[in-house]
Amino acid sequence: MIIKYIQLLLKIIESFFIFLFVYIIISFYGGMISTGDLQADGDYCIYVQSNGIHTDVCLPTETEVIDWSTFVSKGPFSDEGSFEYITIGWGDKGFFLNTPTWAELKISTALTAAFLPSETAMHVQYSKEPEVSESRVKVYINESDYKNLILFVKSSFKLKNKKIDLIRGKGYSKSDNFYEANNSYHLFQTCNSWTNNALKTAKIKTGVFALFPHGILSHL
C-alpha cells in the first residue's frame, strides 16, 4: 500500500514538472514570436507599462474618438490631480484587492490566482501624461486601430444596469479604483495576456501569446 502511494506521489510530481516545462515553453516562444507593427507616427499616442509582473495600457483621457470620463466617471476619484491619461489593467480580483503592496502577498492568494479560475477586476487610475522609462513605452496608433482598442477595453468591464460596477473602498490611493470585470483569470489567461490581446486588437507589435511582461515590452 505504501509503495502504491509513493508511486502515485511520484507520478503527480512528474506530471507537475512536465506541465511546468510545457508552460514555460509556450510562454517563452509565444512571447518571442511577434505580431503586428510599430508606427513611427499616428493619430494618438498611448503607453504600455509594467511593474515587472503586471502590465497596463495608458490612454489619453479625451480625444475626438472618446472621452473616457463618460465611461469611467471621475467622481469616485478624490484626487484633485491631473486627468490627462487613464491607466487601465485587468487581473485576478483577489490578488488585486488583497495585495496593495508585494509585502502583503500571501502564498494562498498567489496559488489561487495561478491554479484556479477566479473572478477578475479592472484597475483604473487617472493621472497626468506618463513619462517614458525602462518600464514604460510610448506607442503611436491610428484612429481606426484605437477604436478597436477602445471596444476591447470597454468589453472587459462587467456592466450592472448598463454601467460599470465600482468596487467601493478598495483603491490603493485617491487616484485609482477597481471595477468588476468579465472573464476568469487562470494560468493561460493572465493580466499580461489581457494587455497582449488589447495590443493585438489594435494591430500593435507584441508577442503572439504573451503571459509575462517581457513578451510584450520586448517588442516595443
Image (cartoon, helix red, strand yellow):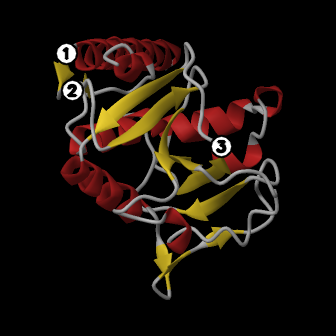
**Residue behind mark 1:** 33
- For this view, does 76 lie left or right of residue 130? right
Question: Does residue 206 sit above or below 199 in this rendering?
Answer: above
- Separation of marks 2 and 1 at Cα, in angstroms: 6 Å
The image shows residue 105 at horizontal and vertical percentages of 75, 31
- For this view, does 130 lie left or right of residue 155? right
- Mark 3: which secondary structure? loop
* Residue occupying image coordinates x 27% and y 30%: 41
Q: How many labels does the image show?
A: 3
Tell me which label, 2 or 1, sits earlier in the chain: 1
Question: Does residue 145 sit above or below 103 in this rendering?
Answer: below
* Residue occupying image coordinates x 31% and y 12%: 28
- For this view, does 207 lie left or right of residue 47? left
- Disc 3 crowd, CA 10 A, few/some/many (<14, 14-19, 20+): few
* Residue occupying image coordinates x 26% and y 12%: 32
Contact flag, marks 2 and 1 (Cβ < 8 Å): yes
Question: Does residue 88 sit above or below 208 in this rendering?
Answer: below
- For this view, does 127 lie left or right of residue 214? right
**Residue behind mark 3:** 128
Q: Which of 15 and 39 is in front in this view?
A: 39
Amino acid bearing label 1: Ile
- On the question of residue 42 being in view, the answer is yes
The image shows residue 33 at horizontal and vertical percentages of 19, 15
The image shows residue 127 at horizontal and vertical percentages of 67, 46
- Mark 1: which secondary structure? loop
Question: Does residue 181 sit above or below 48 in this rendering?
Answer: below
- Separation of marks 3 and 1 at Cα, in angstroms: 33 Å
